[in-house]
Image (tube, helix red, strand yellow):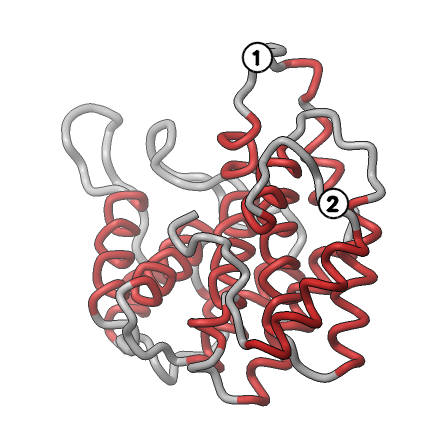
Amino acid sequence: MELVAHLEGWHYEGDGWGPNPSHEGQARVLEALLTSKPLALEGQQDLSQRLRPTYVRAALSGWDGALKADLELPWGQVLSLAADVLEHSDESPFPVEGRSFDDDPDYTEAKKVAIRLLTHLAAKASAERIPDAQRNRLADLLLAAASDAAAWRDYIATVGDEDSGSDPLMVSLNWKWPILLRGLVNLVGLGGSPERQDRALETLGRNLALDYPRGASRAVLGEGSGNSSTTPTTGYWRTFARTSAREGQSTGISRSL
């Protein structure tokens, strides 16, 4: 495909002055394209190896936008790229080009966007559109990401750098670990096989047991329970899962987050 070949081979040639083309500028175009035409890259393989993390992030973000617009996604390609990104080390093999913020230096932002997309996919209204086989793969990806301590380490690493008045809800929107919690809540509410439910509840329980310093988990989990001032217990979520499976109710987590 000409588009992928262009992005794969394009290099910044500006002098740092003036409005020159950049990787970030082209990434915004790619994101807008996939938001309106999510099948535009269908059939393209190995995107995580061929494209810079800037473009990978844009592709995932574009698909997330298309999901919110209720457009059909190339489910297999979406989940494959998300899996490749989450399995990749943070380091990028591509040298940074352009001015500041013109090119992602690593996969940190791409991973956060991938986790957010998986979280939105796990919301009941979205997941019901996904083929069963891909739905199981989605669950596996979320559970694997939530079982990795990297997101938690990133979350607590900068606690000392923040003002004590940080808004827990804003924190919950901008760090991978709280986003993963939201994904686990969505997964619990999604239902599925008893084995998958047990795995989701066990993983959620382990994360609830962590000593979180910011209170973002209360913002995330309180949304699902209707009370942002307290963190529901694992027992609450187990009851919630049974009720969701029986009544088919949604998790109450906003897809806009």
Q: Nearer the viewer, residue 5 or 159?
A: 159
Q: Which amino acid does the dot numbered 1 rest on?
A: Gly
Q: Residue 150 — which label?
A: 2
Q: Tell me the quadrant of the picture where the N terminus can be found.
A: bottom left
Q: Is residue 92 above or below residue 188?
A: above
63 lies left or right of 169 = left
Residue at left 15%, top 32%?
19
Which of the two discs, 2 and 1, sits closer to the camera? 1
> Which image quadrant is residue 214 in?
top right
User: Could you say whether the residue bearing mark 1 is in a helix, strand or loop?
Assistant: loop
Mark before the other along the chain sequence, 2 or 1: 2
At which x and y percent is residue 234?
Answer: 80, 53
At which x and y percent is residue 218?
Answer: 65, 36
> Which image quadrant is residue 103 in?
top left
Q: Is residue 174 above or below residue 34?
A: above
Q: Residue 246 — which label?
A: none
Q: Nearer the viewer, residue 223 or 40?
A: 223
> Which image quadrant is residue 71 in?
bottom left
At which x and y percent is residue 132?
Answer: 56, 89
Q: Is residue 256 above or below residue 193?
A: above
Residue at left 24%, top 29%?
15
At which x and y percent is residue 180?
Answer: 63, 51
Residue at left 80%, top 69%?
199
230 lies left or right of 45 = right
Label 1 belongs to which residue?
165
* 3D distance between C-alphas at marks 2 and 1: 25 Å
Residue at left 69%, top 44%?
151
